Image (tube, helix red, strand yellow):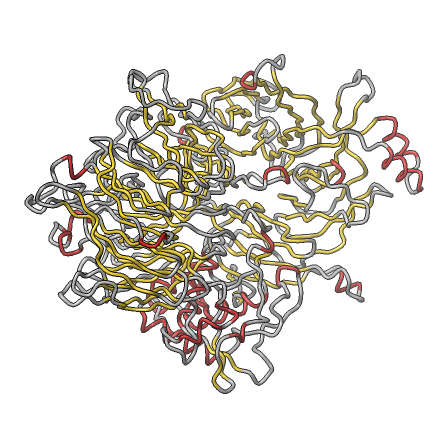
Amino acid sequence: GNGNGNSNTSKSSSSSQKRQSMAITASGAGKDGTIRIVSNGIGMSEQAAVELGGIKGMWNIRKSFNDSDDAYLIQSYVGETRILGVVVENDEDDQHGDKDNVLDTTDESSEVGATLEEVEIEGIDAERSTLFAGNICCASANVASATNDTYSSLMVQITEREVRIIDLVNASMACSWVPSGNELITVASANESGQIVVVLNGRNLIYLQITVTINGNVEINFISQLQLDKEISCLTLNPFDNVDDSSSSDSNAMEIDNESDMDVDSKEHGSFGSGSRSQPLKSKIVAVGLWDNVFVHLLSLDPKNPLLQLDKVNIAPDEEGSSNNDEKGSNNESSQHFMARSLCFVTLQSTTNNGASRGYPTPTATQTSNSNRVNMLLVGLGDGGLVSFVVNVDSGRDSKCSVHSRKEVNLGTRAINLVPFYNHTAEKGTCVLASGDRPTVIYLGGGSGSSNKIPKLCYSNINLESDPSESDDGITMSSRRCESLVVNVATPFHSSDLFAVPSGADKHYSLCISDESMLRLGLIDDIQKLHITTHKLGMAPRRVTYHESGRVVCVGCIDESSGKFVNNSKSSGTTMGNCIRFFDDTSFEEIDRIDLDPFEMILSMVSTNLKVYNDESLQMEEDDKGSNQRQQDSEGNEGSYRSFVVVGTAYCYPDEDEPSRGRILLIQCSLRGEISVLSRKATQVTEVQVRGGVYSICPFYNGTILATINSKMRLCKLICGGPGMNGSFDLKIDGAGHHGHILSLSVKSLANRDGHTESKKQEQIAIVGDLVRSISVVKYYPEYGTLEEVSRDFNQNWTSAIEMLNENTYLGGENFYNLFVLRRNPTATSEEVRCRLDTIGLFNLGEMVNKFMSGSLVIPNSQTSNSSTVSASTNNTANASSEGNVISLGRKPTVKIGSQTLYATIDGSIGSILGLDVYSAAFLSALERAMSRVITPVGNLKHEEFRAFRRQRRQQASKGFVDGDFIESFIDLDRKTMDLIVQEMNKDGDWDVDSPNESIDDGADVEMKGRTDCTKRTLIVCDVIAMVEEISMLH
């Protein structure tokens, strides 16, 4: 981005809390000007949907193991099983069922069309609920490979009463296995090699194997059984990738182009990396999760020692002085919620070398010869938590396995179900979908063959896109209007008959998801941390804003091609014209355009709702200023609200150093004849001439706006029925305004952007950023109709951007690439203290900030607000076992965030600033200090000097800020360095504070000192990693 860049983020109103926030940025100069839409997560474009509630499980089935397309979607309900099949339009198969439940994805422009209709498969028990279904491929006893369709066209269905093997070619049941004594199957799982594990009556684990005899008969053989002391909740026996086969491949195959991203393929795992389904892999171990227990049992599937326990994994946090297998851990209150609800064995493989997404360290030398591939055990918890382990499996004769590198993150509030996806298009790479109220794709990023960085787990939320489209230049609007999903059940589903592959595209992926009432089939985007969509303007943008009521993106541009010859008393020659362009927020087609006068330049632009005041009541207010009559009348004539785009301009004549005139334009986006939403037009409703340039505009209380005009600030109201207006709108400057600034570059208030904030008891204050005189606080007195300065910063800061974090805490950026935070003291007894803004934060960012915007790109939890997404509480931090007076942290990391602010810089960077609670700030500050002491920086440049607040003639130490980029690099360090840093934190001791619930963001004067009681708590590496991961998930 260039110096004229600007940014805007769409705020979430009460009616759209589940919609994803996106940043709209204006960047570039001349013909290279662009609008970029930045969003976090993965977009899913809905292709078909049908109202089907109550789905308990879904599985995709192919007609043959070697097929690339799925043919059936098995759905399990309470007491029944239904099947949706891919039916081609010209298919005259008689298996069509009830057409009420049909997902029609036919594309009229494509030659191929199909639908998902309810069908029947002979051999499937449709009168019972299905616990598991999937394809299997079994080799005959006298055949080297299972290439015969008879053995590769089998599927397994497991119900509570039996295990069925169905031959899809002959449409019949090949064989079945029924438990003896009418025992019920409660949990079941299988894999494509024919290995089956079922649980009878909750605790009896049965291992079965499907084989094909010499005569060609399919049989289900009993292998072994094991009785457990607790009821079993979940199973997984997905095979890990055969690392030995892949390690012999060319190392250059691991290198990925920087512009490519890992995609999700719906194909099930066969032989990973080879893209072949000739022979499925067998699993060597099975993982068993238990109810009311914090352990996951790893059992052998070796024919010599079937169901032999190889390891017992404690999924609860490790406790000081207790082993991983200590049974005492299962009885702690803090471990009661650590019960496995879903398990998944998966081999994750990195396919990108950008290393941009920090979130998960993986082992270094303890892994296989191929450092990009990591065998992992993922554990989904009932409270939305996800615990992961790295699994080492001995490939020798003796079956041995071990787990290490425990990590825990929170992905929501609902129980998680883990569904693996496999990327066969790039012939490498895997990922896992975690369902819940914040469905997330888990994948391995960074650390490719050409990178020295350690690969780490990354997380991307899935968001539902509405009405996706493609622009003329082929750039897809991938994250336009996204809403968060709630996913109960999901499965990959791929069919080339359902969707026409775009020309020139080599990838085509789809996903079936279900919530309480809907079944959706959609396409998903590339997997990456951030999605940036670019739209070329062909001219330089100056300002941008999003007009939600009109569903348009408004861009102020400099049109070099529309030069106009001007000949007047002030100047003669050619001038570039400024214009306002309006784009549809979905298709990004240009709807309308308004050209401005010669020499008129756009300085500010905002979308807000203005309150319509009656002209008569407003005149009565002016006549009765200072009396109660004014307040009663103003409150009695509230009027309605209208949505407008407000534009501030200045006439920049060549012979003027400072603009002497400008305009405030009021623009409304409406329908042409109310025929269609596509027939919108932008209409200038009114304007007001001002003496100077309108550098900044912001929404203010009671449906008004504040505008900074050169060195003055004025309050503007929208009135109806003004003199000579014949009932039309007029924008009127109210009161005398405020004077005394050098040049008022920006103004901000806490009034809602929609303008509906009615302030009767709350202070109506705003902050003004001056060119030279830093930040001042201005208060509006409605009884007098005046604006007065009540507090100011007496330091000389050349401000470039400002933001109100809350009523008494303000953030600023200045032209020496620094950030500073100011605090107001309105309750102080001394007038001198009340009128002075105290500096509580200093930080050198290294880039000039030209825009602050309240908001975040991370989707808020659907059950909690931003301020309490993760509540801080240390009341139960001592639940872990203690030895003397030393107590381990031993709990889930908790972070309470306050304000969330995005910033944009002239170098094209977008960053996030989070307000932290006292506990988190003390913890992360101690980590920052410890890292700066232990890590030797490049060139011996100390971190304290690098982030010191620097100006032209003085330098101050950084304070009140924590360097997020620096502390998040902790997870990229080796284990030895991590241990040294944690030891330094324990020596420091200031990471643990007594007042965890106070908020620095609220302006409280809190000293972050260590605990004063005699109880000393120590940190371990896992505690620090978990805290860093938790904070990295919040931006």
Residue 812 in the image: x percent, y percent?
59, 53
Residue 220 in the image: x percent, y percent?
21, 49
Residue 625 vs 327, above or below: the answer is above
Q: Of 557 and 260, which appears nearest the observer?
A: 260
Residue 201 vs 617, above or below: the answer is below
Q: Residue furthest bottom?
A: 884
Residue 819 in the image: x percent, y percent?
54, 56
Q: Residue at x 48, y 41 (%)?
A: 3
Residue 651 sits in quarter: top right
Q: Of 417 and 440, which appears nearest the observer?
A: 417
Residue 1026 vs 806, above or below: the answer is below
Split into 4 quadrants, where in the image is the N terminus? top left
Residue 102 sits in quarter: top left
Instruction: Report the side of 196 relative to 748 (left or right).
Output: left
Residue 126 in the image: x percent, y percent?
37, 36
Residue 249 vs 733, above or below: the answer is below
Q: How many marks?
A: 0
Q: Of 1014 and 584, which appears nearest the observer?
A: 1014
Residue 396 appears in the picture as rendered: yes
Instruction: Report the side of 674 relative to 496 (left or right).
Output: right
Residue 692 sits in quarter: top right
Q: Residue at x 36, y 64 (%)?
A: 296
Residue 449 appears in the picture as rendered: no
Instruction: Report the side of 388 relative to 708 (left or right).
Output: left
Q: Of 540 and 1000, which appears nearest the observer?
A: 1000
Instruction: Report the side of 875 relative to 491 (left or right).
Output: right
